Image (cartoon, rainbow, N blue to C red):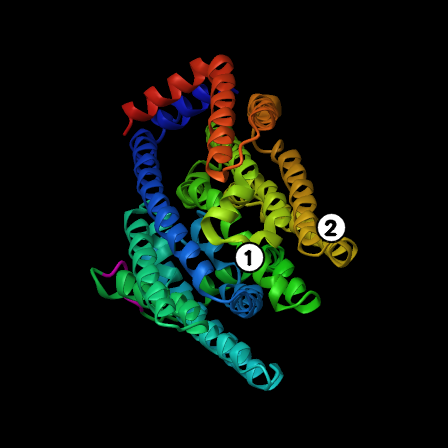
Amino acid sequence: MPLADAVMTVLQCGVICVQEPCMSQSLAQRSISSVKWNAVSSIVQVIVGFIQTIVLARLLPIEVFGVYAAAKSVIGLTIGLPAFGMASSFLYRSEHNLDIEQSAAIHFTIKSALTVLWFALMLGGTLLLVDPDQPDLKLAFVVITMTAALTSMTQTPRLILSRKVLHKRLATLQVIDTIVTTIVTIGLALGGVTLWALLMSDVVTTVVAIFMLYIWRPVWRPRFTWHPAGMRYFLTFGASNVGIRLLTDALDRLDDVWTGAFLGKTPLGFYSKAYSFAKYPSIILASPLEPVSAGMYAEVGHDRKRLSSAFFMTNALLVRSGFLLAGLLALVAPEFIILAIGERWLPMLDAFRLMLIFTLFDPMKRTIANMFVGVGKPRIVLHARILQLVIMGIGLFTLGPALGIAGVALAVDIMLVIGIGYVLWRAKEFVDYSLVALMAWPGIALTIGLIGANLAFSAAAPESPWISGIIKVVCFTGLYGLILLLFERQQLMQTIKMVRKHR
C-alpha cells in the first residue's frame, strides 16, 4: 500500500466509513492535532533534555549514573504490577467501559489498592535486602519507589485523554516537566550535589504530573467506587495484558539489571548513558505517534481497511525517519562523545553504536503492540515478548561476559530484530501491507548513505572532529534524502499536501 494512499484513507476515514462520518472525520482531526502537539512536546524534550544529559554527564561521576540506573531498572521491572494491564482495558472499546466516568472510577479504585500493596512490598524489600554498606543505593530505591507510586496514580486521567485522542494537556505536561527538571537537576549538580541531582528528576516529574492532571483545571476528579461487574471486566481483561506489560518492562530493564549485577556500577554508568543518548531518536519518533496510535487503533480496530491504512502510515513514517536518525548518530558517534560529554565517556562508543539498531525498531515495536491491543489480541504481543525475553537472556549470558557492555547491547539488538520480525508476520492476520513498500527504499538509502559518508570521510581524512562530523552529516543526509526523493517523491509530496490540508 503506497504511503500517500494510506494517509488519504486515514485522514478521509469519514468517506470510507459512511456509517460514522462525523466520528470518523473527528478522529482524523483529533489524530492530526494530537500528533502535532506531541511532536512539539518531543522537540522540546529532545532539545532541553539533551542539554540536561550533556551537562550532567560532564558534572557528575560515572558511578553515580550506575547507582541511579540500578535502582531505576529494578523499580521499572516491577511497576507494571499495580498497573495490572488495565490501561488496555480502559482503551479497548467494550460494552463494559462505554461510560468513561464510571470506567475511570473503577480503574482508579483498583489501581489505588494495587499501588499501595506494591509500595509496601517494594519499601519493605528495600529496607531488608539492599546492602547497608551501600547507603546511596538504598536512598535511590526509597526515593524512586515513592515517586513512582505517586506518579502511577495519575494514570487514570492520562488514559481518559488518550482514549479521547486529546493529547494537548499531556504534551504540555511533558514540556513543563522537562524544563523544570532540567533547571533543578543542573542547578543541584553545579552546586556539587551528586545523587540527589538525579533523584530530583523523579520528584519533579511526580509533582508536575499531579499538579497538571489533578489540581490545575483537573482532567478528572478522583473518586472511589464499588462496581463488581466493571471491576471483573478490568481485572479479567487486564490479566491478559499484565503479562505483556511485565515482559515489556523486563525487556526494557533486564539489560540494566544484568549489567549492574554482573559487570558493576561503573560499566552500568557507561551503558546507561549510551542508552540515554540512543533513545533520543525514539523520543522524537515514538512520542508523537505512540499515544495517538493507541487511541486510533482502538477506534478503527474493527475495520480492516482503515486499520491497514493507519498501520502502514504510522510505521512508514517511523521507518523513514528512524533510518535517517540512526544512520546519522552511528556515523558521528565518536565526534559526538568527544565534543559533547568528553573523552572519559569513550568506553561507551561501541555500545552506543550498537544501540542504534534499537533506535531503528523500538518505536515500531510499541506502535505494533498498540495495534494488537486495538483489535483485542494482546496475546500475540505476549507471545512476542516471551520469545524476545528468552533470546535476550541467552544473549546476555553468552555475549555479556565476553564483550562487556557492547555484548549487552548486541544481545538487545538481536532480541529486538527477532521480535519485530515475529510481530510483523503476525500483523498480516489483521492488516494488509507490503514489507517491501515499508522498508525497501529507506533500507537502500541508509546503506548507500553510510557507505558514501565513510568514503568521503576517508578521502578527506580531517583531523578536527568538527570537520569530520560535518562531512559525515552532509554526505549521509544528502544521499539518504536524494534517494528517497528520487524514488518516493510523489508519495512524499502527496503526504505533505494531505497533512497540510487536514491540519
- Tell me where residue 36 appears, x and y as whole percent: 32, 38
Which residue carries the number 1 mark?
344
Q: Kindly identify the residue that appears in the image at 32 percent across and 29 percent down.
A: 21
> Which residue is nearer to you in this view: 473 or 229?
473
Which residue, as the protein is rendered here, is positioned at the far front?
463
- Tell me where residue 385 appears, x and y as whole percent: 65, 51
Q: Count residues near mark 1 (Cα–Cα under 10 Å), then give few for <14, some for 14-19, many for 20+.
A: few
Amino acid type at image mark 1 = Arg
Viewer can see residue 354: yes
Q: Count residues near mark 2 (Cα–Cα under 10 Å), then give few for <14, some for 14-19, many for 20+.
A: some
Which residue, as the protein is rendered here, is positioned at the far left?
217
Asked if the stretch drawn in magenta spans residue 503, the answer is no
Instruction: Calculate the distance from the C-alpha at mark 2 to the C-alpha at mark 1.
Output: 32 Å
| Foreground tag (2 vs 1) | 1
Above or below, 428 against 86 in this view is above
Amino acid type at image mark 2 = Ile
Question: Is residue 387 toward the left or the right of residue 381 in the image?
Answer: right
Question: Is residue 478 toward the left or the right of residue 449 in the image?
Answer: left
Q: Which residues are magenta?
A: 218-222
Report helix, strand or loop for mark 1. helix
Which residue carries the number 2 mark?
391
Above or below, 137 against 260 in this view is below
> Which residue is nearer to you in this view: 64 or 244?
64
Q: Quadrant of the C terminus?
A: top left
> Which residue is nearer to you in this view: 483 or 156?
483
> Which residue is nearer to you in this view: 68 or 269?
269
Viewer can see residue 316: no
- Tell me where residue 468 appears, x and y as whole percent: 51, 34
Magenta stretch: dominant secondary structure: loop
